[in-house]
Image (tube, rainbow, N blue to C red):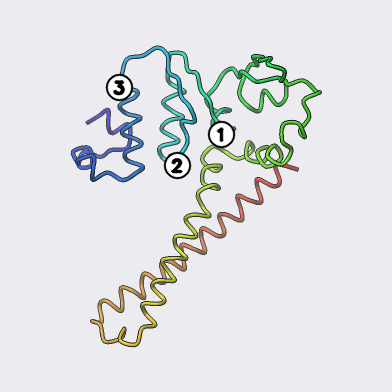
Amino acid sequence: MSYLADFLFPPRRAQSPVRMLSGGERNRLLLARLFAKPANVLVLDEPTNDLDIESLELLEAALQDYDGTLLLVSHDRAFLDNVVTQTLAAEGGGAWKEYVGGYSDWVRQRPVAMTEERAGSKAAVREKGRVKLSYKEARELESLPKEIEALEAEQGLLAAKMAAAEYFRQPADVLRADQKRNGEIDAQLTRKLERWEALETKAKAAAV
């Protein structure tokens, strides 16, 4: 129970069947199983794909504390900056070179001839801003559009329900619950939109 608590499973959830766990909980369970096995080498291919923010933070912390050798492939620049100590980069022409540090360190050390255009200037400029965000902020910025979309979809369904001709014939407690939820969605949307704008502004400022 103590070990599973490290992966954000309270006792009641730790006793639940796997089929009852959410997607994020299943990902955390996979991480718990991975780090429960004795190993001095880990090979991970895009380990941050499809992880929620909590699982990403757990993975990052677990890898930072890992004593063995880690071989990691990832397109997540912020994750690489926070986890790896050396970077193997393709230099072109079949040549590979080792650099000390993560992605940002490689950007500073790489040959001048490897321009931003060659590396993909659009992606590089966008990612340059993300590096300035904290790891949690970067993941939050990526997840906010989907969260906002989900809230807007729920609000649309609720509005359609409340506009139905027979709607007001329902019990008063049902009407109050729908009105309360509609207000909650409005408040959540306002907070998330403001947060999204703030993070976007911070990312763009860092990219300048």
What is the distance, in whole Å, between disc 1 and disc 3 at their CAs? 25 Å
Q: Which quadrant holds residue 184?
A: bottom left
Residue at (25% x, 82% y) in the render: 170
Position of 64 relative to 141 (above/below)? above
Q: Which mark is residue 36?
A: 3
- Residue furthest out toward the right: 113
What is the distance, in whole Å, between disc 1 and disc 2 at their CAs? 13 Å
Q: Which quadrant holds residue 132?
A: top right
Label 2's element? helix
Position of 171 with respect to 41 (left or right) is left
Residue at (26% x, 87% y) in the render: 169
The amino acid beneath tag 3 is: Ala
Count neighbours of disc 3 (C-alpha within 10 A) and say few if under 14, some if 14 to 19, many if 20 or more. Answer: few
Q: Earlier in the sequence, mark 1 or mark 2?
A: 2
Which quarter shows the N terminus? Answer: top left
What is the distance, in whole Å, between disc 2 and disc 3 at their CAs? 21 Å
Q: Which mark is residue 154?
A: none
Q: Position of residue 166 (x, y in %)?
A: 30, 86
Residue at (59% x, 17% y) in the render: 86
Label 1's element? loop
> Looking at the image, which is closer to me, 39 or 175?
39
Residue at (21% x, 38% y) in the render: 11
Q: Which quadrant holds residue 80?
A: top right
Q: Earlier in the sequence, mark 1 or mark 3?
A: 3
Which quarter shows the C terminus? Answer: top right
The amino acid beneath tag 1 is: Asp
The amino acid beneath tag 2 is: Ile
Q: Which mark is residue 76?
A: 1
Position of 105 with respect to 113 (left or right) is left
Give yes or no for contact between labels 1 and 3 (Cβ–Cβ under 8 Å): no
User: Which residue bears the numbered disc 2?
Assistant: 53
